[in-house]
Amino acid sequence: MKILFVVIFILSSLIIGANSFLVQDEENIGKILFDKTCSSCHTGGFKGWMTGAPKMGDWDDWEVFFEQGLPVMTKHINEGTKRHEIKGGCTDCTEKQIKAAIEYIMSKTKKEIKK
């Protein structure tokens, strides 16, 4: 009986630990997806230069896209455009994950107030 209790305790601890990890990932999914998929073009490196991708953090690069709004941007990324691969190449990403990545980019690209 004691062994059964110990096994149940260990399994419960593992499940609770896994759930907290998943919640943490859910909270940071935008950054995780950006780092995994989007950064190769949107950090200003060679691939971004070659594709003409707007650089995260550069308001002038993103202003025209941000004016379209999050729903339109999400739709364009999910469906692809002439200049952007469908889902940025992340074929297994959900619409919610794509939206989180766009929100992450938006949060890191704020309009600089000029004095």
Image (cartoon, rainbow, N blue to C red):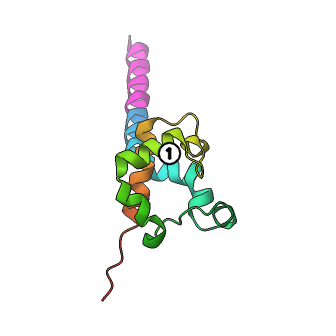
Q: In this view, does 44 lie above or below 8?
A: below
Viewer-proximal residue among 53 and 68: 68
Q: Is residue 42 above or below residue 26?
A: below
**Residue bounds of the magenta highlight:** 1-16
Residue placed under numbered mark 1 in the picture: 77
Q: In this view, does 108 lie above or below 3?
A: below
The residue at 50%/45% (across/down) is: 77
Q: Main secondary structure of the magenta part?
A: helix
Near mark 1 (Cα within 10 A), the count class, few <14, some 14-19 or many ≥20, is some
Q: Does the magenta stretch include residue 10?
A: yes
The residue at 63%/63% (across/down) is: 48
Return the x and y of residue 18 as percentages of the image width and height: 43, 33
Return the x and y of residue 24 as percentages of the image width and height: 39, 44
Q: Is residue 78 above or below residue 38?
A: above
Can residue 21 be seen here? The reply is no
* Image quarter (top left, top right, bottom left or bottom right) of the C terminus: bottom left
Return the x and y of residue 56 as percentages of the image width and height: 49, 65
Quadrant of the image occupied by residue 1:
top left
The kind of residue on which mark 1 rests is: Ile
Return the x and y of residue 37 as percentages of the image width and height: 58, 49
In the image, is 30 to the left or to the right of 115? right
| Identity of the residue furthest to the front in this view | 82
